[in-house]
Amino acid sequence: MEKFKSKIDLWLALLLIIIFGLALIQFAYDKNWIGFSFMFCISAFITHMFATTFYTIERDKLRIKCGFLIDFSIDIKNIKSISQTFNVLSSPALSLDRLEIMYGKYDSILVSPKDKIRFTEAIKRINSEVEIVLKK
């Protein structure tokens, strides 16, 4: 089994820390403990998502895991192409430096493995027919 961590954009992490940090400080200052508790739970949820977003390849399956919300597998033999994209659509990717995986008849998903080369090579070892398009 090979495991690939998601790349995390530093600007995104800092933006979220600043926004949620300031909100938590303001709620605490105002002694608004309900607001503080709510914001703390959201912050914990986002932190959990960041810590548990990864991709694994085991036998002929690509597993995509993002917290407890997303956990599914794709048969690597059904992958048609992998191309680099900076698409901003919501996905189990923590960076805008993403790979779009086309599989099945019309399906696609966006992922952001930290090591794109090793990730695509691992896919290619299982399915040599996958078209890989990475920008230099």
Image (tube, helix red, strand yellow):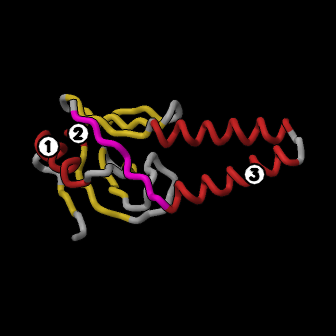
Magenta stretch: give its range. Answer: 2-10
Q: Earlier in the sequence, mark 3 or mark 2?
A: 3
Q: Nearer the viewer, residue 6 or 81?
A: 6
Q: Quickly name the residue at label 3.
A: 23
Give the alpha-carbon distance from disc 1 to disc 3, as whole Å. 47 Å
> Within the magenta stretch, is there residue 7?
yes
Q: Residue at x 82, y 46 (%)?
A: 27
Please report contact status of discs 1 and 2: CB closer than 8 Å, yes or no. Answer: yes
Which quadrant would the C terminus be assigned to in this image?
bottom left
Residue 83, position as x, y percentages in the image: 28, 60
Residue 5 found in image quarter: top left
Asked if residue 16 lies left or right of residue 125, the reply is: right
Residue 128, position as x, y percentages in the image: 10, 47
Asked if residue 123 lies left or right of residue 108, the reply is: left
| Residue 13 to residue 55: above or below | below
Q: Earlier in the sequence, mark 1 or mark 2?
A: 2
> Within the magenta stretch, is there residue 97?
no
Asked if residue 127 lies left or right of residue 36, the reply is: left
| Residue 19 to residue 59: above or below | below
Q: Quickly name the residue at label 2.
A: 76
Q: Earlier in the sequence, mark 1 or mark 3?
A: 3
Give the residue type that dot 3 points to: Ala
Nearest to viewer (mark 1 / mark 3): 3
Residue 8, position as x, y percentages in the image: 43, 53
Give the residue type that dot 1 points to: Asn
Q: Residue at x 76, y 38 (%)?
A: 38
Residue 78, position as x, y percentages in the image: 24, 41
Q: Quickly name the residue at label 1.
A: 127
Q: Residue furthest front?
A: 29
In terms of secondary structure, where does tag 3 sit?
Answer: helix
